[in-house]
Image (cartoon, rainbow, N blue to C red):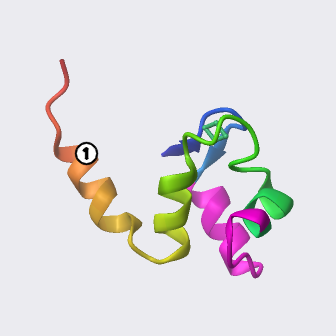
Amino acid sequence: MLICHCKGKSHRDVQGAVALGARNLADLHRICGAGGACGGCRPTLQALLHGRHEDRATVTELRPTR
Ligand code: FES
């Protein structure tokens, strides 16, 4: 799932940055580039940093498409 549309970074890219030691948004930006443009993905990046993204992804996936 694409998380940062500006930089084309996926959930997997962000998890990889966390595995490499990213502990905050500045770390994520430095390691994988996510979050360094419009900032629209930063709430989701924060959730990934704090291990809360799984619940949000599940809710998003269950939303009906229009
Ligand atoms: S969507 Fe990530 S910086 Fe714009």
Looking at numbered disc 1 in the image, what kind of residue is underneath it? Glu
- Closer to the camera in the image, 26 or 3: 26
Residue 21 belongs to magenta span = yes
Image quarter for residue 37? Answer: top right
Q: Which residues are magenta?
A: 11-26
* Picture quarter with ligand 1: top right
Please count the marks in the image. Answer: 1
Q: Residue at x 14, y 31 (%)?
A: 64
Image height of 48 relative to 39, above or below: below
Label 1 packing within 10 angstroms: few (<14), some (14-19), many (20+)? few
Q: Residue at x 28, y 65 (%)?
A: 55
Q: Which residue is mark 1?
A: 61
Image height of 40 relative to 14, above or below: above
Lateral position of residue 53 relative to residue 14, left or right: left
x, y (%) of residue 51? 45, 77
x, y (%) of residue 36? 76, 45
